[in-house]
């Protein structure tokens, strides 16, 4: 049985920047706080927690769980302006590792809203409640409609939540499927009263967009796909769905404990891949485990 790790899988640049930054701070401070999970991968979180990283929630911050002067890390997903104001009011030292791509989108969405209001509308294609999406919605004081799929977009148009006779700026969460975003934008364009009233912003991360194409090719080139990602990873769900469409023998695991020997045949060509939140060391661990099954 041959086992190959997808060379394009693993942390994206934004997550690498946040993880490296956290490890550098831990070397100096021995412990500090992360507002939310720094990465949506249980194995990597466990590794960082052992080094001293403490994950807290926004409710913890609001309740005064941190002592004044505590260091608070903002992860790659980003946060709305209100979070920074709250942290400052609690006397926290904010260490900002928001992904530069996300920061650019936050700036663009603010500018679009300020230039259009009150007549304009903001639509965000993303997962409702996702940290990055909450950060984007917060840039416009909640004046955005978030849709997760085409049916939700159509329902919002039918209900009047989206008015196609008014100007619309549409954005996407950085890790969403480029194909789904394109389909959604085409459908919206057909419903608009005038094409001059629609601005489509290409906000899917280029690295993520390229990974969709590469991962599809990788999935088709192997007999079996073992996709490694955390249960809370939105990007993981999107990419695993892509693998499943390209290869019916695709399986998703969080760690080696979830790998099943009955998935494989002795002469299979196995591909191991993962999400933008999956560390390389975990991909290697799973690949080594599979190699030793036969």
Image (cartoon, helix red, strand yellow):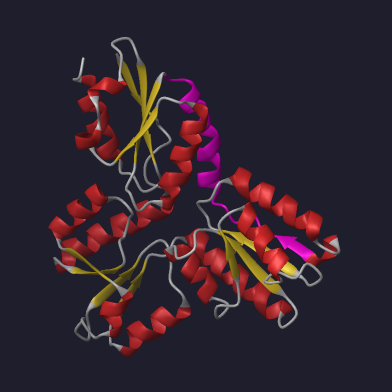
Q: Which of these two is toward me, 272 or 144?
A: 144
Task: Tell me, yes or no, whether the highlighted magenta stretch contains residue 36.
Answer: no
Q: Residue at x 30, y 55 (%)?
A: 19
Q: Quadrant of the N terminus?
A: top left
Place residue 139 in its image quadrant: bottom right
Residue 239: horizontal and vertical position, in percent?
A: 46, 41
Q: Which of these two is toward me, 159 or 176?
A: 159
Task: Tell me, yes or no, whether the highlighted magenta stretch contains residue 221.
Answer: yes
Q: Tell me how many marks there are.
A: 0
Q: Residue at x 28, y 11 (%)?
A: 266
Residues drawn in magenta? 198-222
Q: Does 216 sit above or below residue 167?
A: above
Place residue 274 in its image quadrant: top left
The kind of secondary structure the magenta stretch mainly shows is helix
Q: Residue at x 55, y 44 (%)?
A: 209
Q: Does 90 sit above or below residue 99?
A: below
Q: Is residue 276 left or right of residue 267?
A: right
Q: Is residue 68 left or right of residue 215?
A: left
């Amino acid at each position: 049985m041959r086992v190959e790790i997808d060379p394009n899988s693993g942390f994206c640049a934004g997550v690498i920047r946040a993880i490296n930054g956290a490890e550098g701070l831990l070397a100096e401070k021995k412990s500090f706080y992360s507002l939310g999970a720094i990465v949506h991968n249980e194995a990597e979180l466990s590794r960082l927690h052992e080094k001293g990283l403490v994950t807290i929630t926004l409710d913890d911050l609001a309740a005064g769980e941190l002592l004044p002067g505590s260091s608070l890390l903002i992860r790659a997903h980003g946060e709305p302006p209100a979070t920074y104001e709250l942290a400052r009011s609690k006397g926290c030292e904010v260490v900002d590792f928001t992904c530069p791509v996300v920061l650019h989108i936050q700036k663009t969405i603010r500018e679009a809203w300020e230039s259009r209001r009150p007549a304009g509308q903001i639509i965000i294609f993303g997962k409702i409640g996702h940290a990055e999406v909450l950060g984007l919605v917060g840039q416009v004081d909640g004046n955005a409609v978030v849709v997760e799929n085409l049916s939700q977009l159509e329902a919002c148009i039918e209900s009047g939540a989206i008015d196609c006779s008014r100007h619309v700026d549409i954005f996407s969460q950085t890790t969403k499927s480029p194909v789904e975003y394109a389909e959604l934008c085409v459908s919206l364009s057909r419903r608009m009263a005038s094409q001059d009233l629609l601005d489509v912003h290409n906000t899917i991360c280029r690295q993520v967009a390229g990974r969709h194409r590469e991962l599809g090719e990788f999935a088709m080139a192997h007999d079996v796909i073992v996709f490694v990602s955390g249960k809370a990873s939105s990007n993981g769900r999107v990419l695993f769905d892509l693998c499943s469409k390209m290869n019916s023998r695709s399986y998703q695991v969080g760690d080696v404990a979830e790998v099943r020997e009955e998935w494989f045949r002795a002469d299979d060509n196995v591909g191991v891949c993962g999400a933008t939140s999956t560390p390389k060391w975990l991909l290697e661990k799973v690949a080594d485990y599979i190699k030793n099954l036969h």
